[in-house]
Amino acid sequence: DEALWKECLQCEEKAMEEDKVTGLKRVERLYEVACKKWAEEEDMWIAYIAFERDNGRFENVKKVYSRAVHALKDISGFEEKYNLLQAKVIYGVFVQQGGN
């Protein structure tokens, strides 16, 4: 199941290069299905959040984060990964602005 899902995700992400709007909707739908099927997989939620963030859809980041917190029984590992994800963004901005 998960291998097929990952293959579909790769195909849709590649298709986004040609039609970003349709591709975003399709990838979002794949993540929605995956997060329902594998609701206890914190890495799936982190990947979904990273996808939304990378595409500038920050309102969706908040929504997905909230859903993940409610879906996961133990959020400690999720919170740690989420904080690392946020730190990468902050560091990336710092480097782009010429910081050391």
Image (cartoon, rainbow, N blue to C red):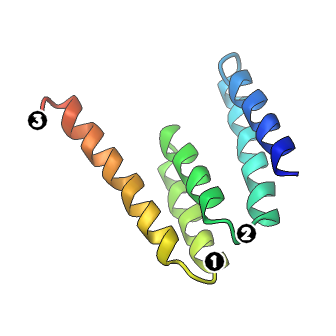
Q: Position of residue 53 (x, y in %)?
A: 49, 46
* Residue at the spot of label 3: 100
Question: Residue at the location (63% across, 77% down)?
Answer: 72
Between 85 and 93, the residue placed more toward the observer is 85
- Disc 1 from disc 2: Cα separation: 7 Å
- Label whose residue precedes the other's in the sequence (3 or 1): 1
80 vs 57, left or right, is left
Q: Position of residue 63 (x, y in %)?
A: 57, 64
* Residue at the spot of label 1: 72
Q: Position of residue 77 (x, y in %)?
A: 50, 72
Crowding at mark 2 (Cα within 10 Å: few <14, some 14-19, many 20+): some
Residue 39: numbered disc? 2
Quarter of the image for residue 27 reads top right
Question: Residue at the location (57% across, 82% down)?
Answer: 74
Callout 1: helix, strand or loop?
Answer: loop
- Amino acid marked by disc 2: Ala
Callout 2: helix, strand or loop?
Answer: loop
- Amino acid marked by disc 3: Asn
Quarter of the image for residue 12 reads top right
Between 6 and 66, the residue placed more toward the observer is 6
- Label whose residue precedes the other's in the sequence (1 or 2): 2
- Is there CB contact under 8 Å for labels 1 and 2? yes
- Disc 3 from disc 2: Cα separation: 39 Å
42 vs 100, left or right, is right
From this view, report whether residue 31 is shown above or below residue 16: below
- Amino acid marked by disc 1: Leu
Question: Residue at the location (11% across, 35% down)?
Answer: 100
